[in-house]
Amino acid sequence: MRSPRPAYLEKAAQRQIVRDHLDELIADLDKIHGPTDPEAVAAKRAKLTGGPASDTEAAA
Protein backbone atom coordinates (compact mmCIF):
# COMPACT_ATOMS: atom_id res chain seq x y z
CA MET A 1 0.00 0.00 0.00
CA ARG A 2 1.32 3.43 -0.95
CA SER A 3 1.71 6.13 1.63
CA PRO A 4 -0.53 9.21 1.12
CA ARG A 5 2.45 11.51 1.47
CA PRO A 6 4.05 10.73 -1.91
CA ALA A 7 0.66 11.25 -3.61
CA TYR A 8 0.33 14.62 -1.87
CA LEU A 9 3.83 15.61 -2.94
CA GLU A 10 3.12 14.51 -6.51
CA LYS A 11 -0.02 16.69 -6.61
CA ALA A 12 1.90 19.64 -5.19
CA ALA A 13 4.62 19.19 -7.80
CA GLN A 14 2.03 19.01 -10.58
CA ARG A 15 0.36 22.22 -9.35
CA GLN A 16 3.74 23.96 -9.35
CA ILE A 17 4.43 22.81 -12.91
CA VAL A 18 1.07 24.21 -14.03
CA ARG A 19 1.83 27.54 -12.33
CA ASP A 20 5.25 27.66 -13.96
CA HIS A 21 3.69 27.04 -17.38
CA LEU A 22 1.12 29.76 -16.76
CA ASP A 23 3.89 32.17 -15.75
CA GLU A 24 5.72 31.37 -19.00
CA LEU A 25 2.54 31.89 -21.02
CA ILE A 26 1.86 35.24 -19.34
CA ALA A 27 5.46 36.35 -19.98
CA ASP A 28 5.14 35.40 -23.66
CA LEU A 29 1.84 37.29 -23.97
CA ASP A 30 3.39 40.32 -22.26
CA LYS A 31 6.19 40.29 -24.86
CA ILE A 32 3.66 40.21 -27.69
CA HIS A 33 0.93 42.52 -26.36
CA GLY A 34 2.65 44.48 -23.60
CA PRO A 35 1.84 44.28 -19.90
CA THR A 36 -1.74 44.23 -18.69
CA ASP A 37 -3.38 47.42 -17.47
CA PRO A 38 -3.84 47.08 -13.69
CA GLU A 39 -7.02 49.18 -13.78
CA ALA A 40 -8.54 46.95 -16.47
CA VAL A 41 -7.63 43.87 -14.43
CA ALA A 42 -9.25 45.39 -11.32
CA ALA A 43 -12.40 46.24 -13.29
CA LYS A 44 -12.66 42.70 -14.70
CA ARG A 45 -12.04 41.20 -11.24
CA ALA A 46 -14.78 43.39 -9.78
CA LYS A 47 -17.17 42.34 -12.53
CA LEU A 48 -16.44 38.66 -11.92
CA THR A 49 -16.51 38.79 -8.12
CA GLY A 50 -19.01 41.57 -7.53
CA GLY A 51 -16.39 43.33 -5.41
CA PRO A 52 -14.86 46.80 -5.67
CA ALA A 53 -12.95 47.69 -8.83
CA SER A 54 -9.67 48.42 -7.03
CA ASP A 55 -7.83 47.81 -3.79
CA THR A 56 -8.21 51.49 -2.87
CA GLU A 57 -12.00 51.18 -3.10
CA ALA A 58 -11.87 48.08 -0.91
CA ALA A 59 -9.96 50.00 1.76
CA ALA A 60 -12.43 52.93 1.70
Image (tube, rainbow, N blue to C red):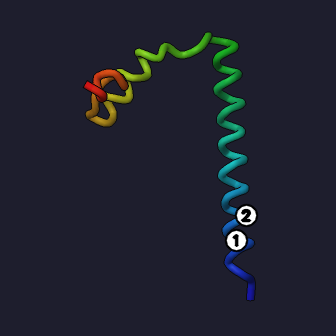
Asked if labels 2 and 1 touch by Cβ distance under 8 angstroms, the answer is: yes
Pinpoint residue 15: horizontal percent, then vertical percent.
Answer: 65, 52
State the residue lying farthest toward the bottom. Answer: 1
Q: Quadrant of the N terminus?
A: bottom right
Q: Quadrant of the C terminus?
A: top left
Question: From what the image shows, is residue 29 above or below residue 51?
Answer: above
Tell whether 37 sits left or right of 16. left
Kindly identify the amino acid type of the residue bearing the numbered disc 1.
Ala
Res. 35 image quadrant: top right
Cα distance in 3D space between marks 1 and 2: 5 Å
Residue at point 65%, 20% (across, down)? 29
Q: Amino acid at mark 2?
A: Glu
| Residue at (33% x, 21% y) in the render | 56
Residue in the picture at 71% in, 39% down: 20
Q: Secondary structure at mark 2?
A: helix
- The residue where tag 2 is placed is 10
SS assignment at label 1: helix
Residue 57: percent from left, percent from top: 28, 23
The residue pinned by badge 1 equals 7
Query: In the rendering, at what x and y percent does residue 19 appear?
Result: 66, 42
Q: Residues within 10 Å of mark 1 (few under 14, many from 20)?
A: few
The label on residue 46 is none
- Foreground pick, 32 / 8: 8
Q: Which corner quadrant of the image does residue 25 belong to?
A: top right
